[in-house]
Amino acid sequence: MKHENYDVVVIGGGPAGISAAVAACRQGCFTLIVEREEILGGILKQCIHDGFGLFRYKERLTGPEYAFREQNELNSLPVTVHTSTFLVDICREDEGDGFLMTFVSPDGMLEVRAGAVITATGCRERSGRQIFLHGERPSGIFTAGQAQGFVNLKGYLPGKRIVILGSGDIGLIMARRLTLEGAHVLGVYEIKPEPSGLTRNIAQCLEDYSIPLNLSTTVKSVHGRGRMTGVTICRVDEKLNEIDGTEKNLSCDTLILSVGLIPENEILDKLHVPRDPATSGPEVDQDQMTGLPGLFTCGNAQHVNDLVDYVSESGSMAGRAAAEWAEGRKYTHKAGASIRIKMNRGEGLLYQVPAVINPHGSDPVFYFRAAKTMDGGRLSIKDGRGDEIFSKSFTFLKPPEMERFSLPVSFFQDGSDEFYMDLEEVV
């Protein structure tokens, strides 16, 4: 077994991981980035549509173009990169506050010690079994990401007559992509009364191509043995229960699932890192540090973002903070690491990140989603005494579209042991 030592180790080589490694290295840290695939870039490699980089690079880039720019930045720095490498174990060192990790790589087993670790492991798609899709198990059922990989990377068309379940952004983009490749997309079926994807994708991917969007509708069952022959769709009520008598059979050979993403954090189970139930990711402070000092997380492993620019931003924040932790140049290397003020969440918010604040940390950047669509909303933050310390108005809010704002950390240095954030509709 080989042995290596680093200041900072980044697990995951997508946009968040690359940005984190770049930031840590620029702080002067000896940095390693580990990726399980053969090539860095994460999901961006197969996202050939544009719209990436509007905030970070002030240009409309495709996914590969965005990844290429990040990799060029990484390649200009002395960062060690291990690809086709898998993490099999991670634990605290017996002495000190560092971490000990075991990887399996093309060259064999590798043991790595690090002063700080950043997880940038992204997210995975929900499968048909996770949404209790009934029927046989014929071929022709794909997640939207699988279908995207088949078309954009391998040049294979997964089917000719296609039904899409769920209106997540990847599903919407694939509706357009498959139509351009000659397939007939019968429609997009969303169980909720509102679409899950961005407004721009509804317009550009469905409306521009006359692809119907059916809300409050789901796939009740799939048909066929060997290859799919069709699906049964039905309407649902306000509690998402199927409505008897609304069933309709559709003849199709392919069902594509765009039914949600799950942050991939199973590697942290052994470390018992506190999770935020609203995001399914680790609970972090404004420096992206989890409840385990020295362990940071960023990107979609923390919460599912709707823009890659924000993924890279959180990676950069995590990289800087992890470097300062590893070198002992920040509050987190001292007793202040345990100071975590809870940010309580009101019913108007689906979630907000960070979920805790360290009053000795950096100026926090907040990301949040509204719990429901609002024509106008007012966000407020109150201290432990109930006094409002900040408010901000928004003209239009909807759950699929994440909002962002920043505040000076001095707002949270009044001695309160908790704060309260809520969003209320303003008519």
Image: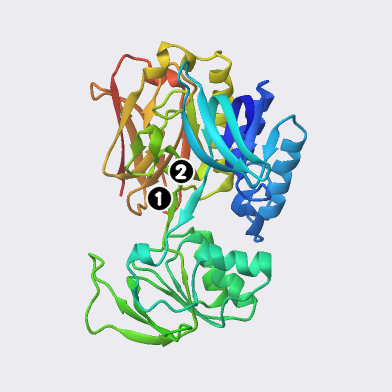
Q: Is residue 299 left or right of residue 247?
A: right
Q: Residues within 10 Å of mark 2 (few under 14, many from 20)?
A: some
Residue lying furthest right in this view? 76
Q: Mark 2 highlights which residue?
A: 403
Residue lying furthest front in this view? 1
Q: Position of residue 360 (x, y in %)?
A: 44, 16
Task: Identify the coloring.
Answer: rainbow
Residue occupying image coordinates x 52% and y 72%: 207
Q: Residues within 10 Å of mark 1 (few under 14, many from 20)?
A: some
Q: Position of residue 424 (x, y in %)?
A: 29, 43
Residue occupying image coordinates x 52% and y 71%: 206
Res. 58 in view: yes
The CA span between labels 2 and 1 is 8 Å
Q: Amino acid at mark 1?
A: Leu
Image quarter hosting the N terminus: top right
Q: Earlier in the sequence, mark 2 or mark 1?
A: 1
Quadrant position of residue 179: bottom right
Asked whether the residues under the numbered discs 2 and 1 touch, taking CB atoms below 8 Å apart as contact, a structural biologist would say: yes
Q: Is residue 52 left or right of residue 123?
A: right
Say what secondary structure mark 2 lies in: strand
Figure check: 155 above or below 261: below
Residue situated in front as seen by the camera: 1 or 339 = 1
Residue situated in front as seen by the camera: 159 or 85 = 85
Q: Position of residue 78 (x, y in %)?
A: 74, 29
Q: Amino acid at mark 2?
A: Glu
Q: How many marks?
A: 2
Say what secondary structure mark 1 lies in: loop
